Image (tube, grey):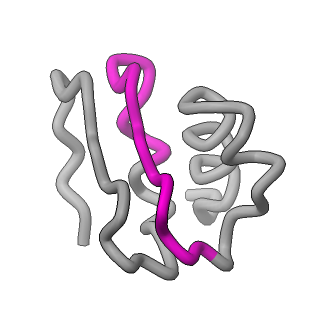
Amino acid sequence: QIIVLAKLEELHLANNSLSTIPNEIGLMGPTLSTFTLQGNCLKSIRRQILDRGTPAVLEYLKDRLPVT
C-alpha cells in the first residue's frame, strides 16, 4: 500500500532495477513535479509515456487505478 505524501515534490527512483511501479503514485500529483525512473526495466509503462515526462507518467498511473 502506498501512502500519498501530499507535499512531496521530487521522487527519484532511477537505476533501482524496478520492473513495476504502483499505480497509486499517480495520486501524488500535482505537487510531484519530478519523478525519475530512468535505468529501470519497466514493463508496465511504455517508453513513449516515460519519454513524455512526469505529468504523463502520473496521468498514466492514475488512469490505471480502479474506479471507486
Q: What percent of the width, then of the height, locates residue 60?
A: 69, 48
Q: Quadrant of residue 45?
A: bottom right
Q: Is residue 12 left or right of residue 35?
A: left
Instruction: Pick the quarter of the image with the C terminus.
Output: bottom right
Residue at 54% from the left image edge and 32% from the top image edge: 54
Residue at 50% from the left image edge and 81% from the top image edge: 19
Q: Main secondary structure of the magenta part?
A: loop
Magenta-colored span: 26-42
Magenta residue check for 57: no
Does residue 9 sit above or below 27 in this rendering?
above
Residue at 42% from the left image edge and 43% from the top image edge: 36
Report the front residue among 51 and 30. Answer: 51
Does residue 45 sit above or below 11 in this rendering?
below
Q: What percent of the width, then of the height, locates residue 9?
A: 24, 22
Residue at 59% from the left image edge and 73% from the top image edge: 42
Does residue 51 sit above or below 38 in this rendering?
above
Q: What percent of the width, then of the height, locates residue 28?
A: 36, 36
Instruction: Pick the quarter of the image with the N terminus.
Output: bottom left
Q: Is residue 45 left or right of residue 5?
A: right
